[in-house]
Amino acid sequence: MKTDGKTLAAWPEQKLLRALAELANAVSDDVPGSEGSRRAAQRFVDRWPGFLPSADDALILSYFLRQVWQRVRTPGWDLVLVGLLFSPTPGELLKEIETFRVFGETEAFDINRLKRTVGLDDMIEHLTVDWARGRLGYKPQTPLQVALNLLIEKSHLTKICANPDCPASFFVAKRSITKYCSDDCMAPFQRQWRLDWWRRHGEDWRAKRKKGRKR
């Protein structure tokens, strides 16, 4: 699903990161192949036209993104990500992810097959020489590739909300120290912190305040 530069410009950074987080949250870990999960994947494809070609692709990529967010380091995982960054047709790579999801460790990635999914022509089309900065440059061709490249660059901002009851726990924070995805998720813990503080220090605080008023 190659896209021209003008079309890619319509996908700003925050929009792409929001799309990845939404996709990671779209499908339940418990039953990724359920009818409810498939409907969620289709809603994502409808909501973000041009990002992924099908609900099946969204279903598989949602699983992959959750592993990335949770810092799961499976052999071959990074190679799949590199392949997605360079391959014009990610279907074969997504099949590898789906095979691993279904069979787990008993069915290891076929590293040689993964390597064959990306050819030299694909790499040349995506790479440039940046002489001014003395490095290779990456030139994504699709919104998905732009988003995945951003995911690597902003990996320190990919967070899991600290509220265990959060309905959409995967998010991209603005600051690396952020623990909660929203004020709503943080509010009950702020209330609890205030209550705990008051139990520990409230009596001293009242005594000091009372003493100050007598002066």
Image (cartoon, rainbow, N blue to C red):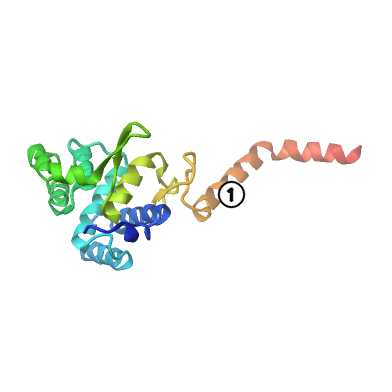
What is the quadrant of the C terminus in the image?
top right
Q: Is residue 200 above or below residue 148?
A: above
Measuring from the top left, give residue 113's x and y in whole percent. Answer: 8, 42
What is the quadrant of the N terminus in the image?
bottom left
**Residue 12 in sight here:** yes
Q: Is residue 140 left or right of residue 99?
A: right
- The residue pinned by badge 1 equals 191
* Of 155 and 138, the residue lying toward us: 138
| Residue displayed at 12% across by 42% down | 114
* Of 55 and 186, the residue lying toward us: 55
Measuring from the top left, give residue 64's x and y in whole percent. Answer: 24, 48
| Residue displayed at 24% across by 53% down | 61
| Residue displayed at 62% across by 45% down | 194
Which amino acid, mark 1? Arg
Q: Is residue 170 above or below residue 177?
A: below
Q: Is residue 139 above or below residue 10?
A: above
Question: Label 1's element?
Answer: helix
* Of 117 and 119, the residue lying toward us: 119
